[in-house]
Image (spheres, rainbow, N blue to C red):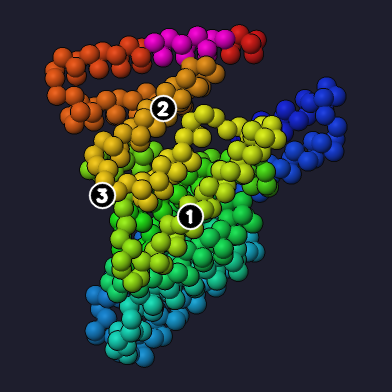
Amino acid sequence: MKKHIRWLNNELQSWLADGIIRPEQADTIRKRYPDDMSGLPWGAIIFSSIGGVVLGLGVILLFAYNWDVIPRFWKLTTIFSVLIVAHSAGIFLQIRTERFKALGEALNLLGTMLFGAGIWLIAQIYHIEEHFPNAFIIWALGALAMAWALPSIMQGVLAAVLIAIWCGSESVAFNNSMHVGPLIIILLLGSLAYVKRSLVLLTVLIPAFLVSLLFVQAGHYFESGLLFGTALNVAALLVALGILARKYGNFAESSPVFLFFGWVASIIILYVLTFPDAAKHLLKFDCSYEKFLVGWAYWAGSAWLCLIGWGALSYMSLARKQNMGITADDYLLPLTVILGLFYMFFKSGLDGWAISGPFNLVFLALVVAMMVRGCRHGLLQPTVVGSVLLIIYMITRYFDLFHSLLVRGLVFIVAGVVIFGQGILYSRAKSRKVEQKQ
């Protein structure tokens, strides 16, 4: 059983004994935070699956070394026999037994690896000159079918990776946009992650979805401004989804995953936009190209969804006074999106710091907001993240903004004093929290 679920169950028993909550309320709380994965030996499953993948690659290389001397009949017999044996044994162990469930998962993953190898080997046997990315989508569909049939989280992980590779190979090698790729990830694999309440699958799906989305957009019309803008919009949208998941729905534990990827991507993008040259070249697009509209649709659609999501959060938090857990630094993300939209349309005649200046102010406001929140409430994470971002920012500006050694020295002294004072304030806030608990 997970630590936080065990803690919650113990607290619920205490609350029931003290009469704080009723039994039906305790049942409602338990349903909101299920422990569906408590019986799964995830350590064994992950390492066994990695072993299955490595074993599959070894078998593929072994066959490849001796492939030319093996007759065609025995080639096909070997491919199908190994595939059938691996999946049959894996399905039996995974479905019929609990003790060897991890081994069954690994054998099924090995079978799917061999299925992919079989696609390439059969094409080699019969000299099939086919569009090579098709092999990846056939392989991915096989993994997707196994993911839902068993059901299997690791098969879903493999399917997500293969779909991202498929989108990438189509985009890079043939300038094709496989629009169905991101849809498969978000609809079929996303629903599997929700049904199984799998944080592992969700952790893979989010970057796979973003990568495939950008490959699709680049394959049809490569424009750095639209790609960068889409990434910014999706990153801010992920943070909004994380806040919504934390407040509503039956998969509240997915919130940290959405928030992690959303915040990491948003901070990186905002940091890049603090550089004048980067902001100048990234916040633009050329609408004269005939394929512009499809790339623009992805960018505009992601911006629309992002602003709707943050608008709904703002309405519930500010107008309806619901406690959504939104902080001041959260609201800086939609502000960044709005600034990006503004400069994409209206930056004509602007250059250098006229474009990146507002993003520098937003970045500094984000740093200050994190540090203030951490010091006020005794929270370690925002305190540390804010301090690290401030140090990174000051080092960056040391090389491209302050040319006088005197000014550089004063800036670093000020930053050091701020961080030192923050440490004192954080310690006091932490002490107050400990005293209040006692």
Q: Amino acid at mark 1?
A: Ser
Classed neighbour count for the residue bearing mark 2: other residues with Cα under 10 Å, few (<14), some (14–19), many (≥20): some
Residue nearest the observer in this picture, 188 or 418: 418
Please name the residue shown 52% across and 12% down the image: 429
Q: Is 30 left or right of 214, judged from the image as shown? A: right
Q: Marks 3/2: CA distance?
A: 24 Å
Q: Give how far across and how far down residue 242 sits, in percent.
A: 56, 43
Task: List the residue tagged with mark 3.
Answer: 281
Q: Is residue 428 a member of the stretch shown in magenta?
A: yes
Q: Give how far across and how far down residue 70 sits, in percent.
A: 29, 85
Residue 365 image label? 2
Secondary structure at numbered mark 3: helix
The N terminus is located in which quarter? top right
User: In the orientation shown, which residue stands out farthest toward the front?
Assistant: 349
Please provide the residue range marked out in magenta. 421-432
Q: Marks 1/3: CA distance?
A: 20 Å
Q: Image quarter for residue 153?
A: bottom right
Task: Tell me which secondary structure the magenta stretch mostly adopts.
Answer: helix
